[in-house]
Image: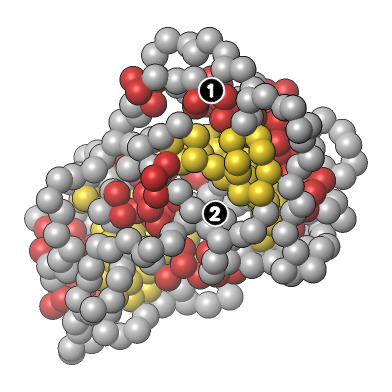
């Protein structure tokens, strides 16, 4: 039986993140030097209520984390990096917090090839009650070796094809900060020829702030909304009935591999969050169709599609038989027939990936659900 957590696009992205631009591909950052007598960063008084992004990071720290090799202080804007992958919302669906900021022009269609771009994004993700599942799995297909002591916490640090990250178990939460930039691995991003150590050093003050705020927060302050549904069974039926999906693809015979909801022994944050949110995928027998299911994920998808950058990076859709309140958007590659459609039916969020007709499959699913 196959272990199905994220669609191939998400897994492919994880596998791509294996090397850094200027240093050798297998290089890991040196631990940030610290004084032998250094004490953990004092925990500031926590604000009342559930923590928001501004409680974790001030604008000056966001700007410093995104500063490039020119040494100038950029002016970041709050924005969510465009993605046509439902798995990128797993932290939100599992009761976590996702914050992000951008410098440069918005990315646009995430599946479109570009020769040049100047965007860079800072991402902060906090998943409560996940410290016990923490791993140093930041990029590629295995955990990184880089370590640094930040705000009294031992953190993993490393870089991949698209950027660099710092991750650690803080209190009972899994906390991860990362920067991503266009053409990072080619040295053509705002970080140019900066070394891993230099980029991680710029990101460290932001990590100190997020770690301190998280460590000093009470359970109620980390109680972000979750959309997890109890007793989800991975099934490829109902709206996913193979007869209607196969007909939409023009196939006389169509079926799925049997899905499972399982957690690998060592997994990155996105996979752990997807497991908690019970996100699963149904792989079609044609080899070109994958449908990912997130029961109770409609609010997370609706909110994400309204955020700056993601709202303009994906094309809004009006699907046949959709009702008021349901949302849909897509992104298509310009170098192949691949398209990804994100949409909701009731309280469930779906992603259809297809090289044939993802919109037709989505509309067939809606028809079968009505």
Identify whether 222 is placed above or below 194.
above
When asked about the image quadrant of residue 177, the answer is top right
Residue 194 horizontal side relative to residue 268, left or right: right
Determine the residue located farthest toward the right in the rendered image: 70
Residue 90: x and y in percent read: 38, 48
Q: Nearer the viewer, residue 245 or 100?
A: 100
- Quadrant including the C terminus: bottom left
Residue 313 horizontal side relative to residue 151, left or right: left
Q: Nearer the viewer, residue 218 or 238?
A: 218
| Mark 2 residue element | loop
Residue at coordinates 79% horizontally, 68% vertically from top-left?
Answer: 24
Residue 240, visible in the rendered structure:
no
| Mark 1 residue element | helix
Front position among marks 2 and 1: 2
Q: Which of the two discs, 2 and 1, labels the residue nearer the N terminus?
A: 2
Which residue position holds label 2?
136
Residue 27 numbered tag: none
Q: Nearer the viewer, residue 333 or 166?
A: 166
How many residues crowd around disc 2 within 10 Å: few (fewer than 14), some, or many (20 or more)? many
Residue 141, visible in the rendered structure:
yes
Which residue position holds label 1?
213
């Amino acid at each position: 039986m196959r272990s199905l957590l994220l669609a191939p696009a998400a897994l492919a992205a994880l596998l791509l993140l294996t090397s850094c631009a200027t240093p050798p591909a297998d290089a890991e950052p040196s631990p940030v030097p610290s004084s032998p007598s250094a004490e953990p960063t004092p925990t500031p008084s926590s604000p009342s209520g559930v923590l928001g992004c501004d409680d974790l990071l001030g604008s000056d720290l966001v700007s410093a984390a995104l500063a490039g090799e020119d040494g100038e202080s950029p002016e970041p804007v709050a924005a969510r990096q465009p993605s046509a992958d439902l798995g990128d919302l797993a932290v939100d669906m599992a009761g976590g917090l996702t914050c992000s900021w951008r410098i440069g022009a918005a990315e646009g269609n995430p599946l479109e090839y570009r020769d040049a771009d100047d965007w860079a994004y800072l991402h902060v993700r906090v998943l409560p009650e996940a410290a016990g599942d923490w791993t140093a799995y930041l990029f590629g297909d295995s955990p990184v070796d880089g370590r640094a002591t930040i705000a009294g916490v031992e953190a993993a640090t490393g870089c991949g094809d698209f950027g660099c990250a710092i991750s650690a178990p803080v209190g009972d939460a899994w906390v991860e900060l990362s920067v991503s930039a266009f053409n990072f691995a080619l040295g053509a991003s705002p970080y140019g020829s900066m070394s891993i150590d230099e980029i991680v050093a710029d990101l460290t003050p932001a990590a100190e702030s997020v770690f301190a705020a998280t460590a000093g927060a009470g359970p109620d302050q980390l109680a972000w909304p979750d959309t997890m549904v109890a007793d989800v069974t991975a099934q490829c039926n109902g709206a996913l009935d193979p007869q209607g999906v196969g007909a939409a693809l023009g196939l006389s015979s169509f079926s799925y591999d049997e899905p499972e909801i399982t957690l690998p022994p060592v997994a990155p944050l996105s996979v752990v969050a997807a497991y908690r949110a019970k996100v699963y995928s149904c792989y079609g027998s044609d080899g070109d169709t994958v449908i990912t299911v997130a029961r109770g994920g409609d609010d997370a998808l609706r909110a994400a599609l309204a955020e700056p950058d993601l709202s303009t990076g994906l094309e809004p859709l009006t699907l046949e038989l959709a009702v008021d309140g349901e949302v849909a958007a897509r992104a298509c590659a310009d170098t192949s027939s691949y398209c990804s459609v994100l949409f909701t039916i009731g309280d469930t969020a779906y992603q259809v990936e297809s090289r044939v007709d993802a919109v037709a499959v989505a509309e067939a699913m809606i028809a079968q659900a009505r």
